[in-house]
């Protein structure tokens, strides 16, 4: 439990998911498509989470049964997280490289800004494919499948589930934490929809500010959380192997 929620939080920092859901909340807005995308992301996240948890516990690869295999898994995941952190850090672009027009780049996908409206719907990002046509969205089934494909389990999420599998909590407590991990993983799809429902008049400004902040600092945050999680999991794995 000690690292499951932070790892799930890091796994939820996913700009692509944010860009896609903002597309469906933009112009023309379609809550049905936003819900379909959320349903797809939730399906793959929770089903995969349950499957991974049951597999780890059923195979006996937990600290309670076989400490050495569990330590090896932790070392592998820790090294993998550190590799991810280094890879993202090396690909980080300097702030000056974005240029003065960075606000109009791909991460300004929230189609709420005046420039986006003036450009027309076909000028905004279309992660789901350009064949949806100007001013239209693809079918709900395709949007659902897009959610499934774009939210396949990441290494950070798998690490969070592994941490849950190694706990001595009751099944009900583990299930509750698994749900919380899934909610954190889906944060970038959930938050825009919640804002759209609770503050429709101010959603554009809020999401534009949030999207801009994520565009500037999202990669740094993922690098920091991945590095911290990798160090923790790696040390935990080494300690388990030594013991």
Image: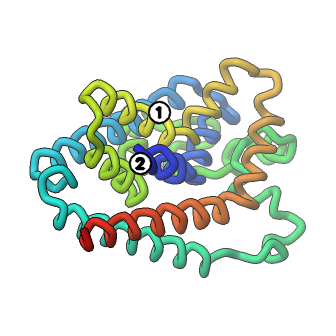
Q: Coloring scheme of the render?
A: rainbow
Q: Secondary structure at mark 2?
A: loop
Q: Secondary structure at mark 1?
A: helix
Residue at 33% from the left image edge and 41% from the top image edge = 44
Q: Which numbered disc covers residue 151?
A: 2
Q: Quadrant of the C terminus?
A: bottom left
Picture layout, residue 242 above or below residue 196: below
Answer left or right for 124 relative to 164.
right
Q: Using the image as rendered, state which of residue 10 and residue 135 is in the foreground.
A: 10
Residue at the farthest top position: 198
Task: Tell me residue 85's x, y (percent).
Answer: 53, 72
Q: Using the image as rendered, state which of residue 193 and residue 175 is in the foreground.
A: 175
Residue named by callout 1: 38
Residue 143 visible in rendering: no
Task: Tell me residue 173's x, y (percent).
Answer: 33, 28
Residue at the farthest left position: 59
Residue at 66% from the left image edge and 58% from the top image edge = 218
Q: Quadrant of the N terminus?
A: top left
Q: Residues within 10 Å of mark 1 (few under 14, many from 20)?
A: many
Picture layout, residue 97 above or below residue 103: below
Residue at 54% from the left image edge and 78% from the top image edge = 86
Please report whichever mark, 2 or 1, sits nearer to the chain's N-terminal start.
1
Residue 173 visible in rendering: yes
Q: Using the image as rendered, state which of residue 131 and residue 117 is in the foreground.
A: 117
Q: Residues within 10 Å of mark 2 (few under 14, many from 20)?
A: many
Residue at the farthest front position: 243
Answer left or right for 127 relative to 159.
right
Q: How many marks?
A: 2
């Amino acid at each position: 439990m000690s690292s499951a929620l932070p790892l799930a939080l890091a796994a939820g920092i996913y700009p692509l998911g944010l860009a896609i859901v903002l597309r469906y909340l933009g112009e023309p807005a379609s809550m049905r498509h936003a819900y379909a995308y959320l349903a797809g992301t939730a399906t793959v996240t929770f089903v995969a989470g349950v499957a991974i948890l049951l597999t780890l516990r059923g195979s006996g690869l937990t600290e309670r049964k076989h400490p050495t295999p569990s330590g090896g898994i932790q070392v592998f995941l820790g090294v993998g997280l550190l590799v991810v952190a280094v890879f993202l850090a090396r690909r980080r672009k300097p702030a000056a490289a974005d240029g003065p027009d960075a606000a109009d780049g791909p991460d300004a996908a929230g189609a709420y800004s005046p420039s986006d409206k003036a450009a027309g719907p076909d000028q905004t990002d279309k992660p789901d494919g350009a064949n949806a046509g100007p001013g239209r969205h693809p079918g709900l089934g395709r949007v659902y499948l897009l959610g499934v494909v774009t939210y396949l389990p990441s290494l950070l999420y798998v690490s969070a589930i592994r941490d849950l599998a190694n706990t001595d909590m009751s099944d009900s407590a583990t299930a509750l934490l698994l749900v919380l991990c899934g909610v954190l993983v889906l944060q970038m799809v959930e938050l825009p929809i919640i804002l759209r429902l609770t503050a429709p008049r101010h959603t554009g400004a809020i999401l534009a500010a949030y999207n801009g902040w994520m565009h500037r600092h999202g990669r740094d945050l993922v690098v920091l959380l991945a590095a911290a999680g990798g160090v923790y999991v790696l040390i935990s794995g080494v300690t388990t192997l030594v013991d």
